[in-house]
Amino acid sequence: MTICFITYGCRVNQAEAQKWELILRSYGYKVTDKKEDADIWIINTCAVTKKAEVQSKRIIKKAEELGIKAIVTGCYVTLVNVDDDNKIKIFPNINKDNIIKEFNPINRSNNLKISRHRAIIKIQDGCDHFCSYCIVPYLRGKPHSISLDEIIKEINQYEEMGIKEIVLSGINLGLYGKDLNCQLNINILLREILEKTIISKIRLSSIEIYHIDEEFLEIIGDQRICKHLHIPLQHGSDRVLKFMNRHYDTRTYKTIFNKIVDKYPNISIGTDIIVGYPMETERDFEQTLKFIEELEFSYLHVFSYSSRPLTEASKCKEQVSENVKRLRSEILIDIGKKLKEKYIKRFIGSKLDMVVESKKLGYLAGTSDNYIKCIVKDDKIQPGSLIKIIINNIEGLTAFGSVVN
């Protein structure tokens, strides 16, 4: 029996699907990325934006039209009422861990692998910060941490499979340990991973600025931790940040940002920006542009505000027009491209560690320790390898290099 995983949305969804894949492979099931070759689709949906909601709705409808047996979970089916039928079985977020119980082992296998060459580890779920635009706390509930022992076990399992890099993911990574009856936190977790595993590279998916302290900055100096942080900003106007119910202002963000860069000058720091938040004025937008110019991120993820049910922002009458959102988004996307190109150019002639993610026609593609997409020509090295490369030149937003012997 062959299964296809169809995943929308965040790294947490990806981590969940990856873990299910590993278990089902151990049960003797085959996994494919081709929907048409699968007997069962396991769909992990998203509802963070309207676009993600539409995508999720469409794939469920497609499964129904094709008569494909599908197991559907995630935020979309937690938000809306989707009924089970003969072919479609629904698991809201609260029950998604029961999905594996739908499968009986066919032929136990110890030859385990996953579809990716970088493993995503879910360390935490849920959030209780209730940013005014975010629906996630309503769909995923309060913070819930995975036990330290379970995380270490999962990392060691991937390392034994030959995986060279793991990505720690969570809905709000810095809340790790908050719900556990001990003094665990993200800093202790990182120290334990460094001590109790030998995985080559450890990457953090995203962390809020207010969870970065002196101890954290000391820990990430370890050579095994990737010099790449994704720190959501969301806006460069203090007025809008207050409306958003974010837990910082631009001054705090800038102070900590500069502290990071002072300690690690070559680190890659990316961020999320929302444009068109209700009541966002031209002045608010200009303040965002100015703030980004002052800090010089290495890349931007730009999102147009999407009204979500249940959230405070959705109740605001002063919504920004779609045309204005589009224009402001285009401006920021263009700035983001220039920032990324400028950052990559700094590393021409530099040596970087890179995990090879794919190989085609003698060319290797992968992502460096500091989050630069790289292409390298080599016929012998296989995907999944951790190699050292030297950046020779760039084209657009891609670096081209050669393997360091």
Image: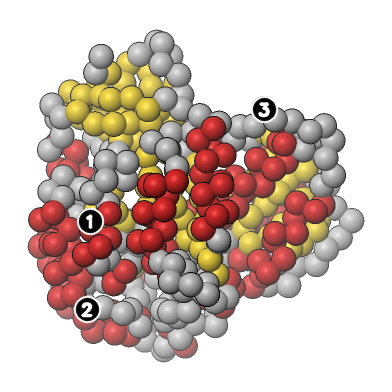
Task: Inspect the image, locate mark 3, and give the three-letter code of the amino acid beneath it.
Answer: Asn
- Nearest the viewer among 219 and 210 is 219
Q: Residues within 10 Å of mark 3 (few under 14, many from 20)?
A: few
Q: Position of residue 81 (x, y in %)?
A: 73, 72
Instruction: State the separation of the CA atoms marked 2 and 3.
Output: 50 Å
Dot 2 or dot 3: first in sequence order is 3
At a point 83% along the width and 40% down the height, the residue shown is 105
At a point 46% along the width and 27% down the height, the residue shown is 384
The reply to whether the C-beta atoms of the residues labelled 1 and 3 are less than 8 Å apart is: no
Q: For numbered disc 2, what is the local secondary structure?
A: loop
Q: Which residue is mark 1?
A: 218
* 280 left or right, relative to 17: left
Screen quadrant of the N terminus: top right
Q: How many marks?
A: 3
Dot 2 or dot 1: first in sequence order is 1
* 378 left or right, relative to 100: left
- From the image, state whether disc 2 or disc 1 is nearer to you: 1
- Nearest the viewer among 144 and 294 is 144
- Nearest the viewer among 333 and 343 is 343
Screen quadrant of the C terminus: top left
- From the image, state whether disc 1 or disc 3 is nearer to you: 1
Q: Against 205, is 319 above or below?
A: below
Q: Which residue is mark 3?
A: 111
Q: Which residue is mark 2?
A: 249
Task: Inspect the image, locate mark 2, and give the three-letter code of the amino acid beneath it.
Answer: Asp
Q: For numbered disc 1, what is the local secondary structure?
A: helix
Q: For numbered disc 3, what is the local secondary structure?
A: loop
Q: Position of residue 316 (x, y in %)?
A: 42, 88
Instruction: State the separation of the CA atoms marked 1 and 3.
Output: 38 Å
* 348 left or right, relative to 199: left
